[in-house]
């Protein structure tokens, strides 16, 4: 399950992510779900504003070079997938 809290404090984050518009540049094609029960896999993220209920805290960076994970935000759930499986460990 991937319940994600976006933090504004870089040092609090479990990892840094950069969002790209080019799918082929991404490590992960992620789908943001509005249903927390959809988020049963690491590629489907449910956003929360409650820090304590999050499984992972992410800081969205503006610099691709400092990101631990490059994400492409897909439109449909079935498009969500790991494009670089070596990065899957960030979601464990």
Image (cartoon, rainbow, N blue to C red):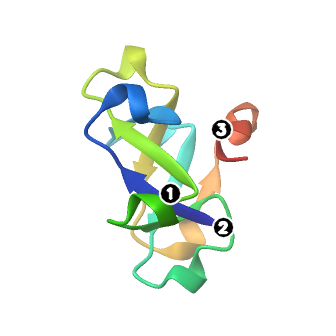
Within-10-Å neighbours for mark 2: few <14, some 14–19, many 20+: some
Q: Which residue is mark 3?
A: 90
Distance (Cα) linking label 1 and label 2: 13 Å
Q: Look at 47% across and 85% down and name the residue there.
A: 35
Question: Mark 1–mark 3 contact, CB under 8 Å?
Answer: no
Marks 1 and 3, the one that precedes in the sequence: 1
Percent across and percent down for residue 74 are 42, 61
Tag 3 secondary structure: helix
Marks 1 and 2, the one that precedes in the sequence: 2
Mark carried by residue 16: none
Tag 1 secondary structure: strand
Give the quarter of the image for residue 49.
Answer: bottom left
Q: Look at 39% across and 25% down and name the residue there.
A: 11
Point out the image quarter for the N terminus: bottom right
Question: Mark 2–mark 3 contact, CB under 8 Å?
Answer: no
Q: Which residue is mark 2?
A: 1
Percent across and percent down for residue 76 are 46, 74
Please determine whether, in this image, residue 37 is positioned above or below residue 79. below
Tag 2 secondary structure: loop
Question: Mark 1–mark 2 contact, CB under 8 Å?
Answer: no
Mark carried by residue 30: 1
């Amino acid at each position: 399950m991937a319940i994600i809290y976006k933090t504004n404090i870089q040092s609090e984050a479990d990892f840094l992510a950069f969002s790209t518009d080019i799918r082929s540049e991404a490590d992960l094609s992620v789908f943001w779900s509005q249903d927390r029960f959809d988020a049963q896999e690491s590629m489907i993220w449910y956003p929360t504003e409650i820090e304590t209920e999050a499984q992972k805290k992410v800081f969205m960076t503006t610099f691709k070079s400092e990101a631990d994970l490059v994400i492409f935000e897909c439109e449909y759930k079935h498009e969500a997938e790991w494009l670089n499986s070596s990065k899957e460990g960030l979601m464990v």
